[in-house]
Amino acid sequence: MKNPKKEFDWFDHKSSRKLLWWLLWITCGLTVVAELFIHRHPHFDIDGIFSFYAITGFIGCSLMILGAKGLGLILKRDENYYGEEEETSLPKDIDGDAQ
């Protein structure tokens, strides 16, 4: 049986992915630049460092991705985990002929 033709989503287009990457980098850059103009009141010495929250967010996100990949290695099962796939046959008439 042929696989049905996959319907493409907006995110599947190469130009859309490129646009999303540009938007991500521009947004990240604007948040770091905006920190130059914001007067913060740090509670500890370490959170007074320039772009502390951007660095903390990047490290946290990276650790979540690495943790998810590690869990994927632990939890992943083989394709035939539930046993071999049974062959499906056509229903038969009362006479035993296939329809």
Image (cartoon, grey):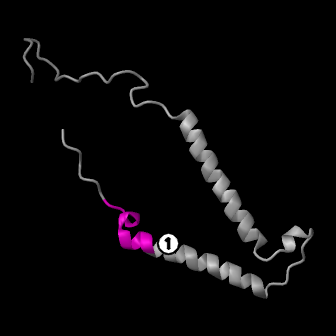
The x, y position of residue 58, in whole percent, is: 67, 64
Disc 1 on helix, strand or loop? helix
Mark 1 crowdedness (10 Å alpha carbons): few <14, some 14-19, many ≥20: few
Residue at (70, 58) in percent of width and height = 60
The x, y position of residue 5, in whole percent, is: 24, 52
Looking at the rendered image, the quarter that the N terminus falls into is: top left
Say if 37 sits above or below 41 in the image: below
The x, y position of residue 4, in whole percent, is: 23, 48
Is residue 82 covered in magenta? Answer: no
Q: Nearer the viewer, residue 37 or 5?
A: 37
Residue at (72, 67) in percent of width and height = 55
Q: Residue furthest bottom?
A: 37
Q: Nearer the viewer, residue 56 or 95?
A: 56
**Residue type of the residue flagged with mark 1:** Trp
Residue at (7, 16) in percent of width and height = 97
Left or right of 10 on screen, residue 6 = left
Say if 77 sits above or below 84 in the image: below
The x, y position of residue 17, in whole percent, is: 43, 69
Q: Which residues are magenta?
A: 8-18
Left or right of 13 on screen, residue 58 = right
The kind of secondary structure the magenta stretch mainly shows is helix
Where does label 1 land, which residue? 21
Say if 36 sits above or below 56 in the image: below
The tally of labels here is 1
